[in-house]
Image (cartoon, grey):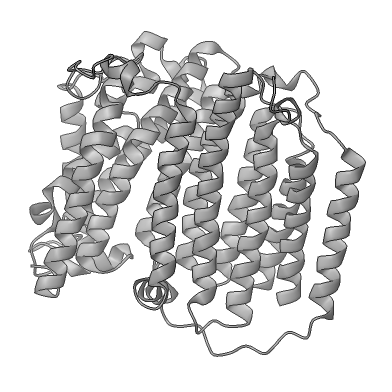
Amino acid sequence: MLQLFLLLAAGLFATGLYGALSQQPIVMIMMGLELMLNGVTVAAGAFWHYLAPASAAGQVIVVVVLVAMAVEMAIGFAVLTAIYRARGVDMADAASELKR
Amino acid sequence: MTVGVVWFNAMEVLTWAGLWLAGWGPNAVLSLVGGYRFVAQGLAYELPLMFALISAAAGAQSLSVAGIAAAQRGHLWFAAWMPAAFAVYLASVYAFSFFGPFGYPAGRDLAGGVLAELSGPDRLVFQAGRWLLLTAGAGMAVPLFLGGGAGPGLPAWAWSAVKTLAVLLALVWARRRLPVIRADRYAEVAWVVLMPLAILQALAVALVVLTTGGTP
Amino acid sequence: MTAVFWVLAPLAAASGVMVFRFASMARVTISLLVSFLASGGLLIGLGLAYLGTVVILMMVMEMVIMAVFMMAYMMNPAGLVAMSMVHNRRGSLAISAATFALLAAGIFATRWPHRAGAPPRDPTFRLGAALMGPQMLTMVTLGFTLLATMVGAVVLATHRGRYDRFGDDLKRRAPSDPARGGVGR
C-alpha cells in the first residue's frame, strides 16, 4: 500500500518534471513545479502514515512543502511580472538572454 | 469533524473558484468583469476571516465546531469578549456571499455582473446558492460566536435555529441600509486596518486563554 | 482506505497529465485544481485531517490566483489557438520517463521498515506541539522565509518606488497611486 502511494507520488513528480522542462510559458512551468510539489506532499503523507505515525516529523515535512509551494508561486509570479514589464513577453525562451 | 472550522473555511473558499468560473463561462465581458471583481474581493476578505476563525478556535482550544460550541456553555459567549472577530466575521459573511455592501460582483453598474448572462434554471440555482451561502454563514456564526444551542427552555436545535434566524434577519435588514462599496475603497482598508485588527484580536484571545486557563 | 485510494489516485494522476494536454487556459488551471483536491482527499484518508483540509484550502486560492495570472499573460481566448508551446519535447519526455522508471525501481526494490508506533489520537495537536517545541527552528525558518518572500515579491513586481509615490522630497501627504480609494484618502 505504501508502494502504491509512492508510485502515485512518483507519477505526479514525473509529470510535473515533464511540464517544467518542456513548457515555454512561465505560468505553465510553474504548473509543472506545483505538480512536482504535489507529488512530494503525497509521498510525505504516505511516509508519515505507513512508517512513522507516532512522530510529528512527517507532518512537519508536509507543512514545509506547503510553505515551499506558496513561496514558489509568489516569487514566480513576481518574476513573471518583472520579465513582462522589462521584455513584454512571458516565454522562458525569450527571457534566456541577459542582453536584449 | 475534528477540523470543522478549517473545513468550513475550505468550503467557503470554493466560492472563489465557483464564482470566477461562473464569470468566465458565459464568454461575455460583463460577467467576466463580475468574476474578477469577486476575486479581488476574495483576496481582501479572506485573511481577516481566517484570523477571526482562528480567534474563535483559540478561545475554545479546539478546531471542531462542536468543541467551540461546548466551550461556551456556562461561560461568556465569544461574541461578547471577542467583538472584533465577530464583526470581521459578519462582514466576511457579506463578502463571501457577495451580498449587501459587498455585492459589487453582481452590481447594478455591471447589469448584474456575474448574473448578467444567466436566465432560467441557471439563474435560479445561482441565486439560491447565494442565499444559501448567506444562511450558511449566519448558521456558522451561532456555534462559533453565539454559544451554539445554549439557552433556557427550548432544546438545543431549536435555539440554534432561532439564533440563526436572528443573525440572518439582522444581515438582511442591514442590507438595505448599507451602500455597495467599491473594491478599491475597501481593499486597502481590509489589508491595512482589518488584518492587523484581526491579528491583534487573535493575540488578545490567546493571552486570555493562557492567563485564565480557559474561557472567562 | 483502499477504496479511497483507488478513487482519488487515478483522478490525481489523470488530471495531472491533462494539465499539459488541454488547450484552454481555464481548463488547465481547473485540471490542476482537481489534482490538488484529490491529493488533499488522499491526505485526509491517510489520517491527516488538518493537513488535507489546509491543502484543499490553499490550493483552491492558489489556483484561482494562477488562473488570473494565466488570463493576464497568456491571452488564448476560448482555446482557439492550439496552446502547445513546448521546446525539447522528446528530451523532456525521455528525462521524465527515466525519472519515473528510476523512482519506481527504487520504490519496489527498497526493503521498507515496519511501522514504528501508532498514530496519535489527535495528529493536529501533535503537529502543533511539535512546531512549538522540538521543531521550533523549522517554524522560525518558515516564518522568515515567508517574510522574505513577501518583501521580495513586492520588490520584484512593482515598478514604482517611494519617490514616485511621495514626490521627489517625500513630502506629499497622500501617495499618488493609479488606483483610487484607500486609507486616508
Q: In the figure, is residue B18 to the left or right of B98?
A: right
The quadrant the C terminus of chain C occupies is: top left
Q: Is residue B193 visible?
A: yes
The quadrant the N terminus of chain C occupies is: bottom right
Q: Residue at horizontal 58%, vertical 71%?
A: C46
Position above or below: C24 against B196: above
Q: In the figure, is residue B214 to the left or right of C140?
A: left
Image label count: 0
Position above or below: C145 against B188: below
Q: Residue at horizontal 73%, vertical 25%?
A: A94
Position above or below: A91 against C53: above
Q: Residue at horizontal 65%, vertical 41%?
A: A30
Where is residue C51 shown, x and y percent of the image? 48, 63
Where is residue C126 shown, x and y percent of the image? 40, 77
Where is residue C47 shown, x and y percent of the image? 53, 72
The quadrant where residue B192 appears: top left
Q: Is residue A1 visible?
A: no
Position above or below: C83 against B77: above
C126, B149: nearer the viewer: C126
B190, B13: nearer the viewer: B190
The quadrant where residue A3 appears: bottom right
Q: In the figure, is residue C96 to the left or right of A57?
A: right
Where is residue A86 shown, x and y percent of the image? 59, 20
